[in-house]
Amino acid sequence: MHKLVICVAPVGMWGKGDNNPITPEEIAEETHQSYLKGASMVHLHVRDTQGNQTSELKAFEKTVQLIREKCDIIIQGSTGGMTALDAEDRCVALNVLGVEMATLNMGSVNFFGGVYINTPEDIVYWAKKMLDKGIKPELCIFEAGMINNVKSLGEKGLLTGTLYYNFSLGFPGALPATLKNLILLVDSIPKESPWLYVEHGIKNFMPIARAIAMGGHIRVGFEDSVWLNNKVKSQSNVELVEKASHIATEMGRDIATVKEARKILGLEEMG
């Protein structure tokens, strides 16, 4: 079994307050401290000073710069978010020096009473951008049928090397976060493909432990949940990373360094 890659998603979707890091300095410091506790990758959105998604790159570029001054953690940008931004504006993070990976949502899905729109045309557009820039896509799956869209992109020559999947479960309106559904998704991809588990609003670490035991990688952070357990909220992203790392170690699964994570995820194949 590969060593465990821990990704931290430090910025919550609720804007300021409740210890949510918003400024470049705050995000960079949370990222660095999470790195020291075992995180080898950070997932970042382009957000303004109020925490809203934006196409303005100044703060994002400064955040990446400050992170790079502190550590060599893998920096992952996002093309996602429930937003009115068009396909081009949603992928502005791909234009920032230092971004090695990016999320690539593999279809549209019902979210929070609305629709999270990722059209086939837009998916191809983002995939081409990533391929041209040498950025590794994280193939985000919210419903089982989206795995077929991965095959379609591969046939178009838009995916190369190791395919790396993100199974995002538990979003209201989408695939529930059950063990049965996770097993279905894992069994639907090539056995050698690395995958990462994300659960929206997760209230305890039992699903995280299951994913670790199944050989998956994990993401924790305020973007997904602030809960350490059913009763206690975390005061920082660092606490969430530290707990995940501790659980994995107690289970006998070693934590990947950044160098090891790059090899596991196929980043070395990107040159």
Image (spheres, helix red, strand yellow):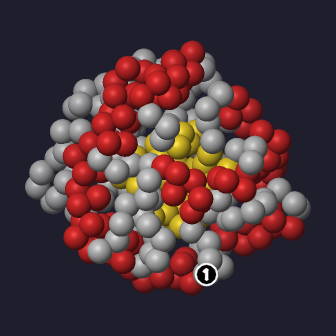
Q: Residue sitting at 54 percent across and 78 percent down?
A: 186
Residue 15 location, quadrant: top left
Quarter residue 203 falls in: bottom left
In the image, 210 versus 194, the foreground residue is: 194
User: Which residue in the structure is indicated by mark 1?
Assistant: 191
As drawn, 38 above or below 150: above
User: In the rendered image of this protein, does residue 14 appear above or below residue 203?
Assistant: above
Q: Quarter of the image holding residue 34?
A: top left
At x 49% / y 63%, what residue is drawn?
A: 196
Judged left or right of residue 72, residue 219 is left
Q: Position of residue 184 (x, y in %)?
A: 52, 82
Residue in view at x 26 percent, y 74 percent? 251
| Looking at the image, residue 225 lies above or below residue 193 | above
Is residue 14 visible in the rendered image? The answer is: no
In terms of secondary structure, where does tag 1 sit?
loop
Residue located farthest toward the left when viewing the structure as drawn: 231
Q: Depth check: give the residue in front, 159 or 147.
A: 159
Which amino acid lies under the numbered mark 1 shown in the image of this protein? Lys
Residue 220, given in percent of the width and then of the height, sits at: 36, 52
